[in-house]
């Protein structure tokens, strides 16, 4: 097959959907398919290149100013003069059998969707982000954006099928976009488990503490960009009770800081000295960083379980999550076995769970091992990639 993968976000830009699109593209190519990636330009990334058997075309772009409406995030769009014609020309020349789009509110999804509808080519759209915010006014604006812009556009371009990566997304797609259940595929995100093999936890622990001057105390990793839906405020508010039991503990925030409320809260609580921000790090650094940490905590607001949490589990690092046990349709996560589940907003419970893991190394080891096994059994990336490819094959012949 000839497959086009479309995503505004693509490496070298870091982020969950960029990582997924890259991994799927490489998998499709490895299975013998011809793959074209269309993405938005990003910093000094080449406008066109061939990598891992994939042709990647990055279109001229602009970045939305950081604001609460953009999740305080550097969201890149390719809505520039001439880009629609170039997208159509690229697709006409490549003549794909199917298009795999990522992100329902990205202009490249809309442009490729217009082309697919006009040429009667099937498309699969994977949603990675829900337009929701913990801030009331921002949430209202995002709901209006969904209702007045995204829903009408999706109704017009009408992707053949839509992927819901979890139960919450399935409900969101039905309610916000009125897409019927028969057009929704349920495929979870996956983890590249080979990246987390043969990690020497003691060596990684020593290297991590030396690299960031963390001392000898416990390290609470918090992986992923800081945005309003993952703001780390609850973690900071739980930190005084953690430090009361473990005064030399450090919270290591790994990722871009696009929302700084947690730092101001830490300053007011007098715990800023225990918070270390690394900024965004290369993908290759993440396995060792997670393996060298004592616990990973960042999904705390009930907005879902992200790839970062799953990678922590794959590394054998115990996690604390403010989520529901049946979040994924493929398998339940057992509280007290594969992770510790807490109530969103309950910082006393959060502090108690972190202390429980730091106080009991055997429990932490057991939960880390069980979480690793759970990810291996349910979210192995080749299996997830194969499930996506099966859908594309089916769409291409229908």
Image (tube, helix red, strand yellow):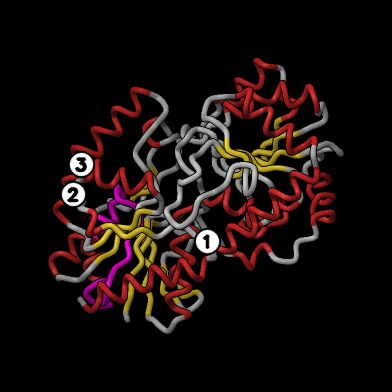
Query: Residue 356: x percent and y percent?
Result: 73, 34
In what quadrant of the picture does the C terminus appear? bottom left
Magenta stretch bounds: 90-111
Q: Residue at x 52, y 53 (%)?
A: 14
User: SS of the residue at dot 3?
Assistant: helix
Task: Report the residue marked by disc 1.
Answer: 379
Task: Report the residue marked by disc 3.
Answer: 149
Q: Quadrant of residue 298?
A: top right
Q: Kindly report which numbered mark, 2 or 1, lies closer to the viewer in this rendering.
A: 1
Q: Residue at x 25, y 39 (%)?
A: 146
Q: Which mark is residue 153?
A: 2
Gap in angstroms between the C-alphas marked 2 and 3: 6 Å
143 within the magenta span: no
Query: Residue 105: x percent and y percent?
Result: 30, 47
User: SS of the residue at dot 2?
Assistant: helix
Q: Is the C-beta separation of discs 2 and 3 under 8 Å?
A: yes
Query: Residue 109: x percent and y percent?
Result: 28, 56
109 within the magenta span: yes
User: SS of the residue at dot 1?
Assistant: loop
Specify whether residue 279 is in view.
no
Specify whether residue 34 is in view.
yes
Query: Residue 153: x percent and y percent?
Result: 18, 49
């Amino acid at each position: 097959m000839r497959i086009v993968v479309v995503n505004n976000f693509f490496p070298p830009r870091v982020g969950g959907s960029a990582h997924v699109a890259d991994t799927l593209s490489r998998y499709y190519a490895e299975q013998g398919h011809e793959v074209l990636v269309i993405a938005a330009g990003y910093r000094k990334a080449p406008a066109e290149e061939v990598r891992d058997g994939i042709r990647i075309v990055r279109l001229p772009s602009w970045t939305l100013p950081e604001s609460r409406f953009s999740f305080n995030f550097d969201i890149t769009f390719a809505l520039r003069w001439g880009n629609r014609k170039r997208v159509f020309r690229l697709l006409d020349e490549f003549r794909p059998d199917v298009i795999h789009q990522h992100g329902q509110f990205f202009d490249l999804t809309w442009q490729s969707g217009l082309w697919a509808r006009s040429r009667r080519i099937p498309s699969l759209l994977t949603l990675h982000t829900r337009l929701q915010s913990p801030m009331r006014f921002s949430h209202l604006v995002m709901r209006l954006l969904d209702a007045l812009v995204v829903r009408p556009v999706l109704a017009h371009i009408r992707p053949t099928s839509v992927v819901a990566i979890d139960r919450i997304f399935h409900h969101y797609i039905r309610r916000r976009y009125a897409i019927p259940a028969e057009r929704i595929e349920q495929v979870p995100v996956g983890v590249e488990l080979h990246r987390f093999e043969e990690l020497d936890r003691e060596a990684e622990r020593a290297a991590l503490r030396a690299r960031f001057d963390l001392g000898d105390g416990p390290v609470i990793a918090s992986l992923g960009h800081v945005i309003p839906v993952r703001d780390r405020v609850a973690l900071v508010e739980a930190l005084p009770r953690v430090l009361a039991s473990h005064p030399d503990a450090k919270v290591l925030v790994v990722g871009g800081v696009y929302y700084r409320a947690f730092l101001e809260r830490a300053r007011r609580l007098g715990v800023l000295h225990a918070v270390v921000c690394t900024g965004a790090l290369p993908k290759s650094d993440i396995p060792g960083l997670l393996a060298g940490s004592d616990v990973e905590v960042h999904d705390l607001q009930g907005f879902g379980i992200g790839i970062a949490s799953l990678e922590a589990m794959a590394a054998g690092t115990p996690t604390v999550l403010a989520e529901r046990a049946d979040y994924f349709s493929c398998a339940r996560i057992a509280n007290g076995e594969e992770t510790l589940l807490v109530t969103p907003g309950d910082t006393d419970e959060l502090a108690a769970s972190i202390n429980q893991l730091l106080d009991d190394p055997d429990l932490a080891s057991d939960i880390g091992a069980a979480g690793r096994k759970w990810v291996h059994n349910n979210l192995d990336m080749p299996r997830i990639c194969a499930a996506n490819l099966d859908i594309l094959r089916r769409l291409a012949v229908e």
